[in-house]
Amino acid sequence: MSTLTKEPTPAAAAPARTYPAYSRNLLARVLLNREAAVILGLVAVYLYAMANVQFFDGPLTTYNLSKEYAPILLMALPMTLIIITGEIDLSVASTLGASAAITGVLVVEHDLSVPVAALVAIGVGALLGALNGFFVAYVGLPSLAVTIGSLALYRGLAEGLIQDKRIAGFPESWQDWPTERIGESQYPNIVIPIAVLAVLFALLLHFTSFGRGVFEIGLSDEAAHFSGVNVARTKLILFTLSGAVAALAGVYVALKANSVATDTGNGFELKVIAGVLLGGVSIFGGRGALHGVVAGVLLIAVLNSALQLDGQGSEVIQIIIGLLLVGSVIASNFLPRIRALIPRRAAVAATAPQTPVNGDQTRKASQ
């Protein structure tokens, strides 16, 4: 008596699972994505401006770009992680204004040293961010509604601290430090903390289990929870970091301008969000990379500077940046759908049954 064992045939095997994101080779994955497109756009705009815009190739262009867009770049780092989780923080500019007001009051009116006042302001900024995070993560309120409310609340806190006056008169040594050049280069000192924070946030997002949890939350809160991610704690940490970094940007803005007013940092939140979305982060969460965001902010900075030097008015600059923002949101919605169709067709073609060409092959297949 013999035992018959049935060998699984290729036709009977389960269809192979495909992973479109990894179905291409490494070079294609690195070069054919939105981050690479933004970096290419940045290089193209920069080279065009260098060749065609008068004074853009001057020695002050890089210095002024770095100095003016430093607070935007700082606030864009934690904002990237927040948007990847599917949330948003609209209160960053108001937190910046409140921390600048706290720094000004403590240094100018109470003779506190700048480092101590800066630490107090950053601590208060972290608390303001944690308040946002508590309502979003533990109370379950929408981040859009919470941070619209705190946008007005924190701006009112700044107005309450300094009323309608303008605080000025920071120590000269601290006024100069953020904008002093690094050696003989065209970069101010503020680039150093930005580079350090950019590396730290990139490591946190792309090379740690915490960062993987951020992406999982953006794809699905519930799935992330059942896979072991502490969703509420992750969101609380991200909003706290956002508040602390916005406060650091506020200290920088106060020292750079040597003055603080109730409108300090007003409107910065739109530039931050525009840079993050232009850098390839999906507004729906679950996708993004920090190097794309840095390129997105720099692209806006270069465009802004080139258009100003070309004599264009602020309305033209706002229209162009607005069109880029709308285009980036549309692209984040439709490009993945289009890209998903390509491997699906390839997979269907690869798994389609092949017709035997002659009788011998038919008999071999049946055996």
Image: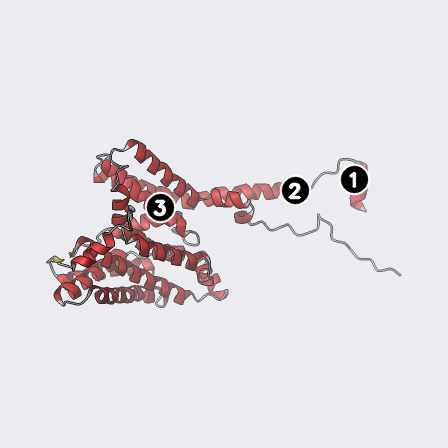
Amino acid tagged 2 = Ala
CB of mark 3 within 8 Å of CB of mark 2? Answer: no
Q: Quick one: label 2 or label 1, which is nearer the N terminus?
A: 2
What percent of the width, then of the height, locates residue 227? 50, 64
Under mark 1, the amino acid is: Gln
| Sequence order check, earlier mark of 3 and 1 | 3
The residue that disc 1 covers is 361
Categorize mark 3 by other alpha carbons within 10 Å: few (<14), some (14-19), many (20+): many
Please name which of the two marks, 3 or 1, marks the residue nearer to the observer.
Answer: 3
Q: Is residue 210 left or right of residue 108?
A: right
Q: Which residue is rendered at x = 48% and y = 61% of the image?
A: 223
Image mark count:
3
- Tag 3: residue type? Gly
Any mark on residue 296, and which? 3
Residue tagged 2: 352
Q: CA distance from mark 2 to mark 1?
A: 17 Å
Q: Measure the C-alpha gap from mark 3 to mark 1.
A: 57 Å
Q: SS at mark 2?
A: loop
Give whichever of 334, 113 is nearer the camera: 113
Of 233 and 27, nearer the camera is 27
Viewer-closest of 366 and 245 = 245
**Residue lying farthest to the left in this orientation:** 165
